[in-house]
């Protein structure tokens, strides 16, 4: 599969693209079943909701050990981390060959999985999850350039009430001033120039098997889950081979997985 010229132009303009009905529903269900087992038994490393919004910029940039027990945390699970090594189903999805030509187009480079960031099963548990505030993922990643994108797989229906992703189209191409972010690098919602931009946000309902690819600088957020059912999703990040990790940072503490180039 490859993007059309119009689709590629749309990604470059908006910073994200939705691939409807991309993943096999049976594969999604199998991934979801394994994820639920890991969540039930709290198989480390995991991240909980405890203190998520108040963790410092330095914590997000530098901390390598994300096991909740290391922090004495017993709260609601926010994500399963380091899923590439957890189960063959997770690994196979992250190495999916069908999506690779699309990623090659977007990155204009060989695709490399970076296991340092995302590489997660993301959860929003009913009534116990927190909102995810406006942010750019790239803010605490350390690479030579910004040629990184994330692949988000909906394992079931996602919509406004259970915390579907919202985006500000084109924000990956914008230059921002320091005062537009708070001290934890969340995009502020209390200043006029940001409020005007936030009003341009967009979101859509996702069905099982839908995939969103979005740029590392794209501003995005999500509501907490106000329904009675968990929302569980899969997200991982890739970069171009020419994009180099900065040694001595958290980004360099985990392996990279170069994927063979696929010709179409």
Image (spheres, grey):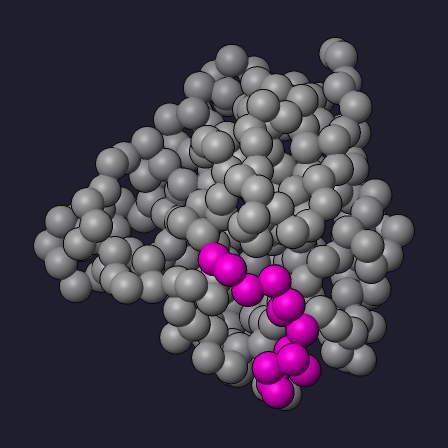
Q: Residue at x 33, y 58 (%)?
A: 185
Q: x, y percentage for residue 80?
A: 68, 66
Q: Residue at x 63, y 26 (%)?
A: 241
Q: Which residues are magenta?
A: 61-73
Q: Residue at x 83, y 64 (%)?
A: 34
Please say whether residue 149 is visible from this viewpoint: no
Q: Is residue 74 magenta?
A: no
Q: Quadrant of residue 33?
A: bottom right
| Residue 247 sits above or below residue 88 on the image | above
Q: x, y percentage for residue 150?
A: 57, 42
Please say whether residue 49 is visible from this viewpoint: yes
In this orientation, which residue lies closer to the viewer: 120 or 178?
178
In this orientation, which residue lies closer to the viewer: 177 or 1?
177
Q: Residue furthest left?
A: 192
Left or right: residue 197 versus residue 166 is left
Q: Is residue 68 magenta?
A: yes
Q: Residue furthest right?
A: 88
Q: Residue at x 44, y 19 (%)?
A: 9
Q: x, y percentage for residue 3?
A: 59, 20
């Amino acid at each position: 599969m490859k993007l059309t010229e119009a689709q590629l132009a749309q990604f470059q303009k908006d910073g994200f693209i939705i691939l409807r009905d991309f993943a096999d529903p049976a594969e999604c269900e199998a991934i979801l079943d394994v994820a639920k087992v890991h969540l039930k038994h709290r198989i480390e490393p995991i991240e909980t909701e405890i203190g998520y919004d108040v963790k410092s910029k330095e914590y997000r940039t530098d901390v390598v050990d994300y096991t909740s027990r290391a922090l004495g945390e017993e709260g609601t699970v926010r994500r399963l981390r380091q899923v590439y090594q957890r189960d063959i189903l997770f690994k196979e999805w992250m190495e999916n060959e069908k999506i690779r030509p699309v990623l090659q187009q977007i990155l204009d480079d060989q695709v490399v999985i970076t296991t340092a960031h995302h590489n997660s099963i993301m959860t929003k548990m009913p009534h116990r999850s927190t909102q995810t505030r406006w942010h750019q993922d790239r803010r605490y990643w350390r690479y030579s350039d910004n040629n990184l994108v994330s692949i988000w797989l909906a394992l079931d229906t996602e919509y406004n009430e259970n915390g579907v992703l919202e985006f500000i189209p084109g924000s990956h191409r914008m230059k921002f001033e320091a005062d537009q972010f708070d001290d934890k690098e969340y995009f502020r919602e209390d200043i006029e120039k940001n409020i005007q931009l936030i009003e341009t946000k967009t979101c859509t309902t996702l069905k099982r098997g839908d995939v969103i690819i979005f740029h590392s600088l794209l501003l995005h957020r999500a509501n907490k889950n106000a329904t009675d059912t968990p929302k569980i999703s899969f997200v991982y990040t890739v970069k171009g081979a020419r994009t180099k990790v900065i040694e001595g940072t958290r980004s360099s503490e985990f392996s990279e997985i170069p994927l063979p180039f696929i010709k179409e």
